[in-house]
Image (spheres, rainbow, N blue to C red):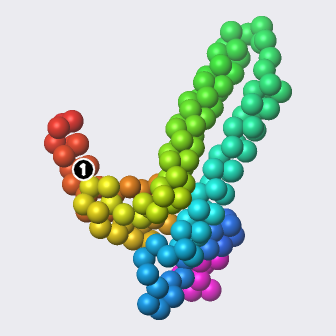
């Protein structure tokens, strides 16, 4: 199997199929918005399932180990899981605000300069709010200020 077919097969296996643009199709057509809405809803659903799994895992695995080293290991594991879930909670909020942008027909355009972000960039980062040029400039400025 050629390399591109392997990549496409692995992408499809994860439940994601890249959008195939129709000739002459307008940017952010109803089909494109529906594609991204489904992608975001599926992503949010996956994140919510992870939250449920973490809660179940922490309830099932919680134990009061007599050995302080075992107790510390478990607490560190739980702490790491909770930090990860906190990051995912913030991502869920960002997904919700992105879904709102789709509903308001504001999705797919750069917040900074107003140009089209692009289908492929949005597929790579569905919550993107800047085109690649503006995002690159922001990152350069951040590095210069942050040192």
Q: Is residue 32 left or right of residue 135?
A: right
**Residue interval drawn in magenta:** 1-10
Look at mark 1 in the image and give the residue it sits on.
138
Establish if 54 lies above or below 118.
above
Where the C terminus falls, by quadrant? top left
Q: Is residue 115 left or right of residue 67?
A: left
Q: Is residue 76 left or right of residue 87?
A: right
Q: Is residue 99 visible?
A: yes
Q: Is residue 49 left or right of residue 125?
A: right
Name the spot of residue 27 as percent of width and height, x first: 42, 76
Viewer-nearest residue: 47 or 116: 116
Name the spot of residue 116 as percent of width and height, x first: 34, 69
Tell which residue pokes out farthest to the front in this image. 104
Name the spot of residue 75 as percent of width and height, x first: 65, 19
In the image, residue 43 lies in the stretch drawn in magenta: no
Total residue callouts: 1
Viewer-nearest residue: 147 or 96: 96
**Magenta part mainly helix, strand or loop?**
helix
Tell which residue pokes out farthest to the right in this image. 60
Viewer-nearest residue: 29 or 72: 29
- Examine the image and state in which quarter residue 85 appears: top right
């Amino acid at each position: 199997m050629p390399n591109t077919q392997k990549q496409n097969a692995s992408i499809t296996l994860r439940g994601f199929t890249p959008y195939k643009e129709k000739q002459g199709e307008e940017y952010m057509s109803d089909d494109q918005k529906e594609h991204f809405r489904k992608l975001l809803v599926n992503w949010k659903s996956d994140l919510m399932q992870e939250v449920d799994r973490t809660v179940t895992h922490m309830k099932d695995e919680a134990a009061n180990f007599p050995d302080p080293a075992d107790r510390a290991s478990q607490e560190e594991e739980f702490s790491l899981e909770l930090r990860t879930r906190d990051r995912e909670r913030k991502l869920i909020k960002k997904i919700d605000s992105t879904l709102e942008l789709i509903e308001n027909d504001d999705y797919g355009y750069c917040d900074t300069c107003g140009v089209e972000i692009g289908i492929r960039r949005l597929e790579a980062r569905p919550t993107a709010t800047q085109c690649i040029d503006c995002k690159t400039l922001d990152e350069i400025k951040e590095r210069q200020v942050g040192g």
